[in-house]
Image (spheres, rainbow, N blue to C red):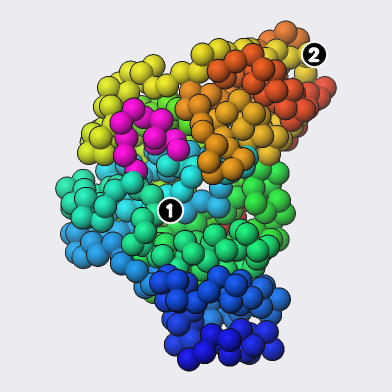
Amino acid sequence: MLFLDLIAKKRDGGRHTPRELAFVAQGAATGSIPDYQLAAWLMAVVCRGMDEAETVALTYAMARSGATLGLGDLGRPKADKHSTGGVGDGVSLALAPLAAACGLAVPMMSGRGLGHTGGTLDKLESIPGFKVSLPLPRIRAQMRALGVCLFGQSADLAPADRALYALRDATGTVPSLPLIVGSILSKKAAEELDALVLDVKVGRGAVFKDAASARGLAAALVKTSKGLGVPAVAVLTAMEQPLGRYVGNALEVRQALEILDGAQTAPDYLECVLILGGWMLKLAGLAKSSERGAEMMRARIADRSGLKMMRAMVKAQGGDVRVIDDPDRLPRAKLFRAVVAPKAGFVAALDARKIGRAGVLVAAGRVCKEQPLDYGAGLCLLKKVGDRVRRGETLAVLHAADAARLDAGEAEYRSALVIGPEAPRRAAVILEVLK
């Protein structure tokens, strides 16, 4: 098979066979196809597209381009959650141990933050000693022992995705629905799941700012996942303002610990945890409905078994377990600053993308993958959309290493904020569920 023929075939609007797509995936994974030819093929896909069968075949081929987790029968169903990314979206930190405490096996392959959105791996690494780069034998052993492990993509898992993703980023071929779907689901297919829940964010702080585009991705993800034999649903969740009360790595770990300890300080965050977890339990066959699954999750919060599972996971992955009972042991920025309201009224808007940008400016996020993070930096959002504020009242507290970063973060925060004379209508957090 000549790869040049496959480039021409897709360029001319042809449809690839599963065998051809397996050839593409193996060539990308092994480096046997030159980057310039892969780049030409990617551009042909962007211009000509792929149908549903091609997308399923490409995703399967990418998942099988290297090793799979190979967990076998754990005596419990395997389920995972994927988020398209947002600001303050540290839901995985609380969701994974809670779901495991409910009887699921949760092998959660996660990523790092870039730009205005945060990454689960960066948040976990703010726990002193916590290791996310784990060899497959260790992941398997932890899954058998605990039923939960949060880890990064290794060179062994879906290597075709690693190669193609890097090329897409460098060649302007990111905006292709089949390629986006293949990238997301190939990593999940390599986990050999029994169920998958997809959290597709919509709004200013999301990749997709309009519901129609997000719905298109959600539908494609669900169809492709089912085509791979993995039951799935997609939940469209709002990202007009940040999720929860914290933005920043150690701060979002603190929020997860608060939720697992029963705190009611971030109702929108908790709502996302419960609906996503409820659907994980429903699809995996451990709950008769998503509502019953959410009740099971609430019970695991109430009896602290989710927090106990979090402690066990932190210990297993080398982290300092003392942070579970004493979050003040998490990294802290050198300086902090309270931002006060310039007038009385109601918070009418809090632009999630700009808040994410403020996080980058205080060094809680990065604009390039080589940029170091200040794990203790970030924002505590004391007031969110709909909250009444008095003139001079604290709206947020910024954390950073120096005054210059605080200045830049404060300016961006204030540009995200709108205070109006009347209370806005409370917006829904859960917008739609696609099955």
Q: Residue at x 70, y 12 (%)?
A: 340
Asked if residue 44 is positioned above or below residue 311 in the image, the reply reads below
Q: Which residues are magenta?
A: 122-132
Image position of 339 (left or right of 73): right
Residue 348 at x, y percent in the picture? 76, 29
The residue pinned by badge 2 equals 343
Q: Residue at x 51, y 51 (%)?
A: 83
Rounded to the nearest angstrom, the CA distance separating label 1 from label 2 is: 41 Å
Secondary structure type for disc 1: strand
Image position of 163 (left or right of 410): left
Of callouts 1 and 2, the N-terminal one = 1
Residue 397 shows in the view: no
Image position of 293 (left or right of 9): left
The residue pinned by badge 1 equals 81
Residue 12 at x, y percent in the picture? 69, 89
Residue closest to the eye, 420 or 151: 151
Q: Quadrant of residue 302?
A: top left
